[in-house]
Amino acid sequence: MDGNRIDKLREKALLLPLEPGCYLMKDEKGVIIYVGKAKALKNRVVSYFRENAGHTEKTRQMVSCVRDFDFIVTGSEFEALILECSLIKHYRPKYNILLMDDKGYHYIHLTDEPYPRIEAVLQKPQDGGLLIGPYMSAYVVRQTADQVNQVFMLPTCSRKFPQDFKKQRPCLNFYIKRCMGVCQGRLSQAEYRKIIGEAVEYIRSGGVTSVDDLEKEMYAASEALDFERAARLRDQIAAIRRIADKQTVLLGEDRQMDVWGFAQNAALVSCVVLKIRDGRIADKENYTFDGEGDIPAVREEFVYRYYAGREEIPRAVVLDGPVEDMGMLAEFLKLQCGHVSEPVLPQRGERKKLRDMAVLNAEEQLAHKIRRTGREVAALEELQKLLGLPATPVYIEAYDISNWGDTGRVGGMVVFENGRPLKKDYKRFAIRDVAGQDDYASMREVLRRRFTRYLDGDAAFSRLPDLILLDGGRGHVNAVQPVLDELGLQVPLFGMVKDSRHRTRGLTTGREELALPMVRSAFTLVTNIQDEVHRYAIAYQRTLHRKADTASQLKAVKGIGDVKLKKLLARWPTKPKLKSATAQELKDALKIGDETARALLEAIAQL
């Protein structure tokens, strides 16, 4: 049935003209679920209904819902772009990227307590305190709260006043003049609330408190011999001047620009737009997209969505990567704002530093979403680029073989998810089918058993990794790759190579070695993976060796054979438990006599 639907849609698409225009995909109820543009309508729309078209998961989901489509022919691709933006704004189709950010409304909150605090909040608190806002920008709210707390040296610790007066020594903020030391109990509630009133006025006036006025108050307090207030005003003036100096970012003529940065982890893409106004960062906007494709696809679509209908666009739009037609983007921006706005890809200088800052913020934003650090996110992206992988390797499996002579041969499998060990998915393999020490054959056995169980639907092996790493060189990769080919699995496979000092040196395919940058995040990640899989395999091998040694010592006791030994270790599987067994318990469990029980207890004591 689905095949007939696709065939009919393909036949209809083949009748489209080879002209620029927009197409509107509809579901079974006639609702428009996707709007797109094309240089040639026929070629673009037909591509959705080809077999094995290599679509992203989002596109496959969209196509599975399409029951019909409509189209509008335009005079040029640029006209199609303008029309596409208008149609998306009107219909808000579920499969298009829409302009919805992570922010909501933010407030500056003055808490309702004897000694109030000033803080940045997302939701309205229910404590009845004073709210200043709402604001759209979380960045501005946090920056303002931090600034006013610094200028007026307000407490930001967790202590409660007046309950905690003089209970502890002042914290570090007091000694570095970031807090007035309310905890010492020297400031009356009336004096504190006067300062809070000044802080609220500072916020409402936009932080334009006159330093000249404060200096006059300081001199007046000094003349009145109120040296404590004079000192506090002096420190407040110094804080205002420090903040003013910090906010003055000299950028030459580049004092107005938007700076874009993207980061990705699996199907999640994070975007940050830094808004530079008057030479400093005036705002930061965050956007997150789930299942929308990779960074180039999201950038290509979202930049246009972001600026559609905006009149306030700076003269420079700094991107961290290109869109398909930079000239058309420039024309589009000019149409929106009425003046030239240049999209640029900086390679050096101040613009590149700001672009790197935007990317770093996108990585940190993404890290917050997936509860990982920005360094871990960056490491996976570096690894993806180094190895030429189609997507970020979120789920990585690594393997190592450990031998103890001709016996005790084992394999260890460790898993890293989002750059961190996922210990619940670690697996151990005792080598069964390989005679003697043969690391290549042992590695083949381990990988074959692991992925055969995946193909058999074993729940413990149900997830296919994004990347396989072997602790070994080209020989290991060349030995294992035929196993994956035989099983019909296309998973990237690389070996982790060590230098003469057993330190991680690089990664290798079956043909060439790829050097890891020695000071970058990817190097640290691969080193951690290699060390962890080596540790895990050796730990398992040593455990087996200790168990074999224990078994041999217990079997040396007269009257203890394989059957009784198996019962013994099933009942008391660890040395502490064995040592806790009594003679009577041994006799009852193993059906042995007094003499054998006494001999067995002596052997257990010597373990």
Image (cartoon, rainbow, N blue to C red):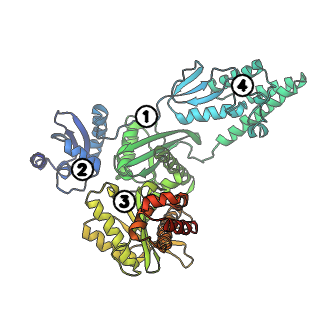
Query: In which quadrant of the rendered image does the C terminus lie?
Result: bottom right
Q: Which mark is residue 39?
A: 2
Q: Can you see residue 150?
A: yes
Q: Of the residues shown, which amino acid type is indicated by label 1?
A: Glu
Q: Is residue 15 above or below residue 197?
A: below
Q: Is residue 80 above or below residue 465?
A: above
In the image, 87 versus 221, the foreground residue is 221
State the residue position of label 3: 466
Residue at the (40%, 70%) spot, across then down: 562
State the residue position of label 4: 161
Q: Earlier in the sequence, mark 4 or mark 2?
A: 2
Marks 4/2: CA–CA distance: 67 Å
Q: Earlier in the sequence, mark 3 or mark 4?
A: 4
Mark 2 neighbour density, 10 Å: few (under 14) some (14–19) many (20 or more): some
Left or right of residue 53, residue 15 in this image: left
Where on the picture, by quarter, is residue 183? top right
